Image (cartoon, rainbow, N blue to C red):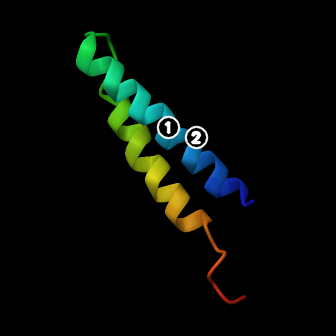
Amino acid sequence: MDRTFTVGAGLTVVGVCGYVVGVLVTYPGRSFSLTALMVGITLAAIGDHRGASA
């Protein structure tokens, strides 16, 4: 598996978990969960080259 895809998937999971916790409890820095989610989705999208011809 591509390392970029793995990091992106991990950041996406962390971002979603941080968002859910941020909805339930107010904590400092909770807006960074959205940043982690956006970066994670982007890295997962560019890291998945299974369908690309190289």
Answer with left or right where residue 12 lies relative to residue 35: right
Spatial separation of the CA atoms under disc 2 and disc 1: 5 Å
Residue at the (38%, 31%) spot, across then down: 33
Dot 1: few (<14), some (14–19), or many (≥20) neighbours within 10 Å? some
* Label 1 sits on residue: 13
Q: Quadrant of residue 18?
A: top left
Which one is in front, 36 or 48?
48
Helix or strand or loop: what does disc 2 sit on?
helix
Instruction: Indicate the amino acid at tag 2.
Output: Gly
Along the viewing direction, whichever of 43 and 24 lies nearer the viewer: 24
* Quadrant of the rendering where the N terminus is positioned: bottom right
Considering every residue shown, the one lying at the far bottom of the view is 53
Q: Which residue is mark 2?
A: 10
Residue 36: percent from left, percent from top: 43, 38
Q: Residue 51, percent across and down?
A: 62, 81
Choose top left, top right, bottom left or bottom right for residue 37: top left
Counting from the top left corner in percent of width and height, residue 25 is at 27, 10
At horizontal 50% and vertical 37% (from top left) the residue drawn is 13
Asked which secondary structure carries label 1, the reply is helix
Q: Are marks 2 and 1 in contact (CB under 8 Å)?
A: yes
What residue is at 30 percent from the left and 28 percent from the top? 31
Q: Is residue 22 above or below residue 32?
A: above
Horizontal and vertical percent for residue 26? Answer: 25, 10
